[in-house]
Amino acid sequence: MKQKRVIFTMADVIAALMLHYWCFWLMFYYSASIDGAIYISSSYAIWERNYLVPLQLIGIPIAATLVSVTLFRRLRRRGLIGKGYIGLVLFNVLPLFAICVCFLTDFAYYFHRLY
């Protein structure tokens, strides 16, 4: 039983870190492409920056929250994990929402500056 908990914890931490790094990269890409540090000229790249990147930066934290809370509740109900794993859920969710808030403030700043 203890081995399953360790495997679950490690898999969860690795998945959460991958999501954190992906969202951080998207935030960097969005900011740099608006500022002009990364030059994009193709119509697809502009469409991606204007629509896909914001959608991912807002959607990933929401999806990660739903998955983390649902998984925590199911495993808690079955008695496979204890209450201490709520810290793991917070580790999954809080940094993603922090990146999302940073994105929204940058988006508002760029929108007011450009338009």
Image: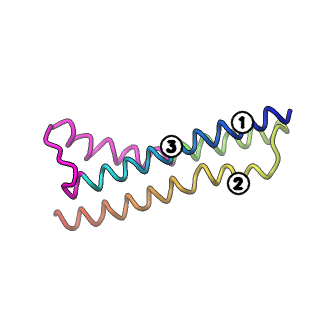
What secondary structure is the magenta-colored segment mainly? helix
Gap between marks 3 and 2 measured at Cα: 17 Å
Q: Quadrant of residue 112?
A: bottom left
Dot 2 lies on which element?
A: helix
Task: Check if residue 34 falls in the magenta segment.
Answer: yes
Mark 2, residue position: 87
Residue 8, label in figure: 1
Name which of mark 1 and mark 3 comes first in the sequence: 1
Disc 3 residue type? Leu
Dot 1 lies on which element?
A: helix
Q: Quadrant of residue 42?
A: top left
- Residue in the foreground of this view, choosing between 73 and 90: 90
Residue at 30 percent across and 51 percent down: it is 30
Mark 3, residue position: 19
Gap between marks 1 and 2 measured at Cα: 14 Å
Q: Is residue 86 above or below residue 108?
A: above
If the image is split into quadrants, where does the N terminus sit? top right
Callout 2: few (<14), some (14-19), or many (20+) C-alpha neighbours within 10 Å? few
Rendered location of residue 73, percent (x, y): 73, 43
Q: Would residue 10 be found to the left or right of residue 115 on screen?
A: right
Give the colour scheme shown: rainbow
Callout 1: few (<14), some (14-19), or many (20+) C-alpha neighbours within 10 Å? few
Gap between marks 1 and 3 measured at Cα: 16 Å
If the image is split into quadrants, where does the C terminus sit? bottom left
The part of the chain drawn in magenta is 33-61
Task: Check if residue 74 falls in the magenta segment.
Answer: no
Q: Would residue 11 be found to the left or right of residue 5 on screen?
A: left
Disc 1 residue type? Phe
Disc 2 residue type? Gly
Determine contact: label 3, label 2, CB under 8 Å. no
